[in-house]
Amino acid sequence: MRRSRWRYLAPIALAAAIAGTYVVVHNGLTHKSSTTSSHVSGRSTTTRHGKSSRAKFYVVKRGDTLSSISQKTGVSIQTLQSLNHSLNDPNSLHIAQRLRLRR
């Protein structure tokens, strides 16, 4: 009795589909996290009307501290604390926490 070659190719095709799905999902997650990290910043931007504006909020990322956020955004630590009443304890930063940078 002769065996069909499809019997051997089907498991290989399944393994290739699984590997391809893994690569696509992994790359999608990697790009999503890097996009999220640059989503909000305190840097100056130029609007369509030519006026310079600053971001109103900053989203806390892993490894951020009040001093590093202050350096990145150009907003003093005292201003950050006065605008964000949840920052009474500087050790209470949470990842994805949204901090106000200006009124």
Image (cartoon, rainbow, N blue to C red):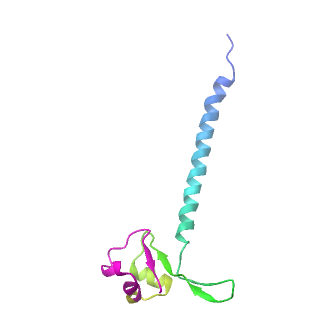
Residue 61 appears at what percent x and percent y? 45, 70
The quarter in which the N terminus is drawn is top right
Q: Locate residue 76: give its quadrant.
A: bottom left
Q: Is residue 80 left or right of residue 36?
A: left
Residue drawn at x 68%, y 25% as measured from the top left: 6
Q: Is residue 81 magenta?
A: yes
Residue 63 appears at what percent x and percent y? 42, 71
Residue 19 appears at what percent x and percent y? 59, 43
Q: Is residue 63 magenta?
A: no
Furthest toward the top, the residue is: 1
98 is higher (above) or lower (below) than 45: above
Residue drawn at x 46%, y 87% as measured from the top left: 75
Residue drawn at x 38%, y 89% as measured from the top left: 78
Q: Nearer the viewer, residue 41 or 47?
A: 47
25 is higher (above) or lower (below) than 17: below
24 is higher (above) or lower (below) than 98: above
Number of marks drawn = 0
Furthest toward the left, the residue is: 89
Q: Is residue 30 left or right of residue 63?
A: right
Residue drawn at x 49%, y 82% as measured from the top left: 72
Residue 18 appears at what percent x and percent y? 58, 40
Write the start and end of the magenta stretch as one range.
79-103
